[in-house]
Amino acid sequence: MTDNVFFANLKKYRLAKNMTQERAAERLGVNSQTVSRWECGTTLPDVLMLPEIARLYGVTVDDLFKQTAFGYENYAQRLSSVYENSRDPVDFMRCREEYLKLIKQDKMSIADKWQYGWIHMYMMNYCRDVALEWYQKAVDDPPEADPNEYSIACMQRIWMYFLLKREDEIIAECKEKVKKAPNDSMQTDNLLVALLFAEKTEEAYEIFLTVKERFHDNWHLFIHGGEICEKLGRYDEAEGYYKTAGEIGTYFCDDLDNLANLYLKTGEHKKASECYLKMAEVYCSRGFDVEAERMKRFAKEALEKGKAE
């Protein structure tokens, strides 16, 4: 590539923008004679000025030196083209930032609007694939390494399948795993979660009743059993199962959190407030001051709501 290509591009891109040398100079913070000297090849812009010139003309710095490059409507559209080729999240973020500037300035054309949607669509697909990949990696790890985190990973993966409208697929998978490992309480619990998400509550309830005695030490199972009963309006049963989970020992106040929500639903605001205060104590003891303060606020709001009613 020769300097002549660079000089010619400076003029070509400026004219493509219907911009005079005076207007370009004003936007770049230089005088019109400077712009003229650049285009004539008398002088070269400072290297630090190149990104600003490229941005003004809707191209990249590399485009300034390419013989076949052409100008875009704006810099955001040029970065859309870059992202289309690379599909690199870094290029997505660069492109998004440029579009956000246009949005703030209320300068989005129809092309800008659909391209802004388009880059997010491709990024959405990328994020979907990455999420599925890493959820799978998590559940492929041995569960005994960290049973609580493993359970969370399974639930998040199931929820992801529901978001993708692939609920039949994940339910069938969960049922197959239970069939292969009927004594694995975690697999049964995953099936209950999938059925809960699918709102197949009666089916989930029947399964829970058949396994709760056999898996009496799995607190996850009793939390989800309580949620099943709550959906069915069996509030007394739900309360009992949440308390059973608490007696077994939950991961992080899961029993208290569910009990508080249940009590709010049934209008027992004082009990809900007491649950929040107990949660605040746990958070404080573990050093989570922000969360503790939030629980105290919830406790106060629960009491105030009870008084108002």
Image: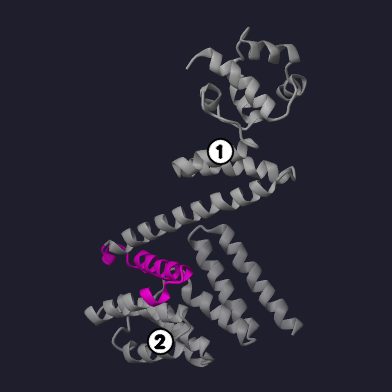
Q: Earlier in the sequence, mark 1 or mark 2?
A: 1
**Label 1 – label 2 distance at C-alpha:** 49 Å
- 104 vs 249, left or right, is right
The answer to whether 236 appears left or right of 273 in the picture is: left
At horizontal 39% and vertical 77% (from top left) the residue drawn is: 168
Residues in magenta, as a range: 142-170
Q: Which residue is mark 1?
A: 79
Secondary structure, mark 1, is helix
Queried whether the magenta region covers residue 116, the answer comes back as: no
Q: Residue lying at the far top in this picture: please name it.
A: 42
In this view, the residue in front, 304 or 190, is: 190
Is 8 in front, or is 76? 8
Q: Is residue 41 left or right of residue 208?
A: right
Q: Which residue is mark 2?
A: 204
Amino acid on which disc 1 is placed: Leu
Q: Is residue 264 left or right of residue 229?
A: right
Name the secondary structure under disc 2: helix
* Residue at image coords 46%, 80%: 198
Tell me if residue 157 comes above or below residue 93 in the rendering.
below
- The image position of residue 123, as x and y in percent, is 50, 51
Is residue 149 something that shows in the picture? yes
Please rate how many residues cluster around mark 1, counting C-alpha atoms within 10 Å: few if below 14, some from 14 to 19, many from 20.
many
Where is residue 187? Give x, y as percent: 31, 76
**Disc sitting over residue 153 in the figure:** none
Magenta stretch mostly in which secondary structure? helix
Identify residue type, mark 2: Ala
Residue 122 image point, x, y percent: 49, 52
